[in-house]
Image (tube, rainbow, N blue to C red):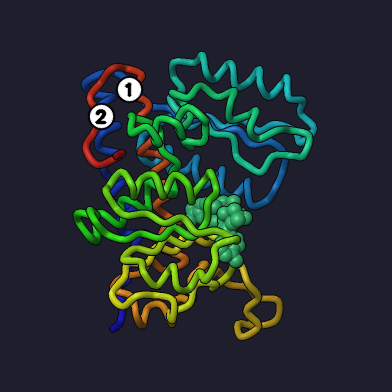
Amino acid sequence: MTAQIIDGKAFAATVREKVASHVTRLKEENGITPGLAVVLVGEDPASQVYVRSKGKMTVEVGMSSFEHKLDADVSEAELFALIDKLNADPAVHGILCQFPVPDHLDERAIVARIDPAKDVDGLSVTNAGRLAAGQAALISCTPLGSLMLLRDRLGSLSGLNAVVVGRSNLVGKPMAQLLLGDSCTVTIAHSRTKDLPDVVRRADIVVAAVGRPEMVRGEWIKEGATVIDVGINRIDAPERGEGKTRLVGDVHFQSAAAVAGAITPVPGGVGPMTIACLLANTITACCRANGLEEPEGLTV
Ligand code: NDP
């Protein structure tokens, strides 16, 4: 079998179109422009690229983008004062602080400072708890995007065996909650899991969120399974020339694609869905803040 490639780039474009058309409606019918504030502390080059690209896409869908760049040695009190200001600003519907932050700042405390109603990264204890309790939440963007891809590919997920490899608060745990919410039978695997290949082999749906290049092999995959590769790893690619690198996922694409029914590529799979879902979450937060009906298909 050769797997169907799940085109996350194309799907993300349709999500952004949906967001853009809803932004137009909110402006025309309600006089509201959804706004996303991004806080960047320090000058980490990768973070700067992410923040620029988030800002660009925010503007492209017609939302307001507020970028706040703070010096690497900013105090916690100064950062919290900014977050408090954004929490109180009615033009700001979503707030995210780009991680990692310098060591003297505590990521958990930062997340806790953000109003859960504006926590578009879905990282707060309140939103994680709401998701676990089956209540309306703002959901971590990468798992939300992964679920959208799965629903698009498979329709109903009910009764399927799903294995999530990785148990981070950012990806693994919310992913497992979402799959459970869609009535999958869910296994969460991690670094202490015994006989991981055997566990993965039972899965109709495999979500790999490990951070280890090409760890999940084709021999681990059940024939016809749907594979969502969340991993983004940069590895050396001497075949492309000296000093060159390339991106790979947590799944060994070639061997897995020979067995799976469908698989996300890296790049071009889950990655583009993450920013699209950040925009979707900002719309959701904006509609909830204003007591307006939420658009279909942008959250669960
Ligand atoms: P974390 O490092 O926070 O979590 C990794 C998880 O993988 C942990 O639960 C860990 O287990 C588990 N793990 C590590 N080694 C093994 C192993 N040998 N066998 C089984 N499980 C293992 O990573 P994240 O969840 O933040 O990210 C995972 C991947 O997804 C990374 O490649 C990251 O770059 C990527 N990512 C991609 C995004 C996107 O937009 N596509 C967004 C966010 C992340 P334990 O808990 O036992 O240590």
Three-letter code for the amino acid on which mark 1 is drawn: Arg
Q: Nearer the viewer, residue 191 or 140?
A: 191
Tell me what residue is drawn at x 53 percent, y 51 percent: 167
Q: Is residue 194 left or right of residue 300?
A: right
Three-letter code for the amino acid on which mark 2 is drawn: Glu
Say above or below: 16 vs 77. below
Q: Residue furthest front?
A: 194
Tell me what residue is drawn at x 35 percent, y 38 percent: 280
Q: CA distance from mark 2 to mark 1?
A: 7 Å
Question: x and y percent of residue 84 in the render?
Answer: 59, 17
Say above or below: 117 vs 167. above
Numbered-mark total: 2
Callout 1 crowding tier (Cα within 10 Å): few <14, some 14–19, many ≥20: some
Question: x and y percent of residue 219 in the render?
Answer: 43, 81
Residue 207: give its label: none
Question: x and y percent of residue 80 in the render?
Answer: 66, 21
Say above or below: 283 vs 231. above
Tell me what residue is drawn at x 26 percent, y 31 percent: 24
Q: Nearer the viewer, residue 51 or 208?
A: 208
Residue 288: give its label: 1
Q: Is residue 277 visible?
A: yes
User: What element does badge 2 sit on?
Assistant: loop
- Tell me whether the residue at label 2 lies in contact with that at label 1, contact meaning CB atoms closer than 8 angstroms: yes
Question: x and y percent of residue 274 in the render?
Answer: 44, 49
Q: Is residue 282 visible?
A: no
Tell me what residue is drawn at x 77 percent, y 25 percent: 75
From the image, tell me which residue sits under label 2: 294
Label 2 residue near ligand 1, CB within 8 Å: no
Decide which of tag 2 and tag 1 comes sooner along the chain: 1
User: What element does badge 1 sit on?
Assistant: helix
Q: Indicate which quadrant contains ligand 1.
A: bottom right
Callout 2 crowding tier (Cα within 10 Å): few <14, some 14–19, many ≥20: some
